[in-house]
C-alpha cells in the first residue's frame, strides 16, 4: 500500500519549503547580479514547478482521502467520516488543503513572483500548520509557569543541522526544477520533431 502521508509530507516539507529557501537564495544571487538572465529564466521554471507542486499536493491529498475511505475504513468509520466531511465543522477538513492549493497558485501572478516578501509569506503557512500552532502555544503556556523557569529544554537540533537541512531543501527543490525544465524541453523537442 502506498504511504500517502509520506508523499504529502515530502511535497509539503521538502519541496514547498525548499521553494522558500530557494527564493531566498535566488534573490540573494540576483542582488549581486550573478548571471541575471539565467537566474530569471530558471526562476520562471521554479515558479511553474511550485504551482505544479501545489496541484500535485491537492491531487495526492484527494487520492489519500479516497483510498482511505474506500479501502481502509470500516462502515462505522465511513459514516463518521462522511458526517465530518459534510457536517457543521466540515471546513476544518477542507480548509487547510484548499488554502495550501490556493497559496501555491498565487505564484502565477507577477506581483507575487517578483518580491521575496510575498514568496516567504506564501511558504510560512506550510511550516506552521494548525496542529503545530496548537503545540507551540500550549508549550509556551507551560514554559511561562514559574515551576518551569529552571528546566533546561534541549531544542533537538544544532544550528549546523538547521543550516544543512535548509541547504538540502533548497538543493532538492532546485534538482526537481532542473528535472522539470529539461523534461519540458525534451518534450517540446520531441513534439517539434514529430510534427515536422
Image (cartoon, grey):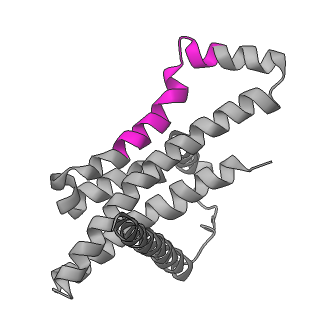
Counting from the top left corner in percent of width and height, residue 129 is at 50, 44
In the rendered image, the quadrant that contains the C terminus is: bottom left
* Residue 55 seen: yes
Q: Main secondary structure of the magenta part?
A: helix
Residue at x 72% of width, y 16% of height: 80
Counting from the top left corner in percent of width and height, residue 61 is at 58, 40
Within the magenta stretch, is there residue 118? no
Residue at x 34% of width, y 59% of height: 48
Q: Is residue 111 above or below residue 95?
A: below
Within the magenta stretch, is there residue 88? yes
The answer to which of 123 and 184 lies nearer the viewer is 184
Image quarter for residue 6?
bottom right
Point out the residue furthest to the front here: 196
Residue 12 vs residue 75: left or right?
A: left
Counting from the top left corner in percent of width and height, residue 176 is at 48, 70
Looking at the rendering, the stretch of residues picked out in magenta corresponds to 83-103
Counting from the top left corner in percent of width and height, residue 66 is at 67, 31
The answer to which of 182 and 186 lies nearer the viewer is 186
The answer to which of 166 and 106 lies nearer the viewer is 106
Residue 170 vs residue 46: left or right?
A: right
Amino acid at each position: 500500500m502506498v504511504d500517502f502521508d509520506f508523499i504529502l509530507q515530502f511535497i509539503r516539507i521538502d519541496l514547498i519549503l525548499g521553494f522558500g529557501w530557494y527564493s531566498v537564495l535566488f534573490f540573494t544571487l540576483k542582488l549581486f547580479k550573478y548571471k541575471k538572465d539565467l537566474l530569471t529564466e530558471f526562476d520562471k521554471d521554479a515558479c511553474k514547478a511550485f504551482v505544479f507542486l501545489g496541484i500535485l499536493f491537492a491531487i495526492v491529498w484527494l487520492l489519500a482521502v479516497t483510498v482511505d475511505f474506500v479501502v481502509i475504513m470500516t462502515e462505522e468509520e465511513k459514516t463518521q467520516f462522511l458526517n465530518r466531511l459534510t457536517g457543521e465543522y466540515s471546513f476544518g477538513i477542507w480548509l487547510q488543503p484548499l488554502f495550501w492549493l490556493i497559496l501555491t497558485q498565487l505564484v502565477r501572478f507577477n506581483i507575487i513572483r517578483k518580491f521575496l516578501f510575498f514568496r516567504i509569506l506564501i511558504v510560512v503557512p506550510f511550516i506552521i500548520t494548525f496542529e503545530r500552532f496548537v503545540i507551540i502555544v500550549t508549550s509556551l503556556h507551560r514554559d511561562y509557569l514559574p515551576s518551569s523557569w529552571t528546566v533546561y529544554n534541549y531544542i533537538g537540533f544544532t544550528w549546523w543541522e538547521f543550516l544543512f537541512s535548509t541547504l538540502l531543501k533548497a538543493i532538492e527543490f532546485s534538482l526537481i526544477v532542473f528535472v522539470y525544465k529539461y523534461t519540458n524541453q525534451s518534450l517540446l523537442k520531441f513534439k517539434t520533431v514529430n510534427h515536422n
